[in-house]
Amino acid sequence: MKKLIVIFFCITCFAANALKAQTSVRGGNLEFSVRKNDQDTIVQITVLDTPQPAPPVEQPASQPIVSAPRQKFDSYSRSYCLIGGAFALPDNRYLTTLGGSSYSLDFGRIRRQQLTRNFAVGGTYKYSFYNYRLRNAAHEEKFRYVVTGDNEMFSDVEKIDKEAFRSHNLAIGIFARLYLIAPRHRRNNDGVFIDIGAQGDYAFNRFYRAATAENKRKFSDDQEYFSKPFYASAVARLGGLWLWDTRNSPSIYVKYRFTEALKQNVLPVDLPPISIGMHFYM
């Protein structure tokens, strides 16, 4: 119906322009043309081809964002010199010691194998010197008899001014290290870490030393009369909690000897088993 109205309108326009030789009008896809010659007027209706719309341009599909793979960690090892010292923790269940004068000194080397960024294993080997300053140990008759052979020097124990048990040790230890904050660089021994491990000592030279105002005497135990040459300890270290920035953070360590240092079937007493100190690395 709509097309008929358009056609009618166009024909009307053609009639109004009849004086012209040729007239054409386009509406949508229809073209109306009127040509006049000497004898007749020709009206022509042409259906035009509808242009096809251009196909839509395909947009390239967006690529998913892929994060770069984390670089694989390569295990490495580092070795450092170790020096340190500790004080024996007094305990009234054992021989009475003077805390400030009962100490140990350590000199050795520590090596760690970094397996992951936050976990390592390692080992230590070191020389240690132990000095236990005793008080009134010779007052125990059995201790005096076993250790000194009831030497005449001790006929009056009240004259004894100083007593000490000393030993020179070689030690080997192993440990597992968990980093709370990993090292910043492979060459460093920093970060915040906790070590848990065990240590075995060989005391190759052990002796009891006593002194009076007149003289002093050392009683070695090379024949193992009253002390043991081998014993084992548990060790824990905490490193990295310091106010200064350093490549080799020192650590606080605690050692607990869980085997006897003195023979309990001979002596009724033993040395204090707990020591607390510090280790420094270079």
Image (cartoon, rainbow, N blue to C red):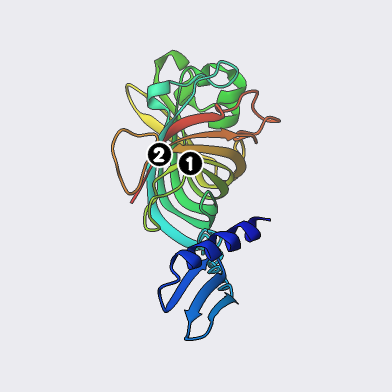
Quadrant of residue 262 in the image?
top right
Within 10 angstroms of label 2, few (less than 14), some, or many (20 or more) residues? many
- Position in image of residue 274 (x %, y %): 54, 29
Q: Residues within 10 Å of mark 1 (few under 14, many from 20)?
A: many
The numbered disc on residue 106 is none
Q: Position of residue 70 (x, y in %)?
A: 52, 59
Looking at the picture, does residue 164 appear above or below residue 38? above
Residue 63 visible, this angle: yes
How far is mark 2 from mark 1, CA to CA?
7 Å
The outermost residue toward the top is 158
Depth check: 55 or 108 in front?
55
What residue type is disc 2 on? Gly
Whether residue 54 is situated above or below residue 232 in the rendered picture: below
Taking the image as shown, residue 32 lies to the left or right of residue 153, namely right
Residue at horizontal 40 percent and vertical 16 percent from the top? 159
Q: Which residue is label 1 attached to?
A: 193
Q: Give the mark, 2 or 1, whose residue is nearer the N terminus.
A: 1
Residue in the picture at 50% in, 41% down = 206
What residue is at 49 percent from the left and 38 percent from the top?
A: 237
Q: State whether residue 196 is above or below residue 28.
A: above
- Return the mark for residue 240: 2
Q: Secondary structure at mark 1?
A: strand
User: In percent of the image, x 47 and y 61: which residue is there?
Assistant: 77
Which quadrant, please, contains the N terminus? Answer: bottom right
Helix, strand or loop at label 2? It is loop
Q: At which x and y percent is residue 282? A: 33, 51
On the image, the x and y values in percent for residue 192 come to: 44, 40
* Amino acid at pointer 1: Phe
Query: Contact, CB < 8 Å: mark 2 with mark 1?
Result: yes
Residue 231 vertical position relative to residue 136 in the rendered view, above or below: below
Q: Nearer the viewer, residue 226 or 66?
A: 66
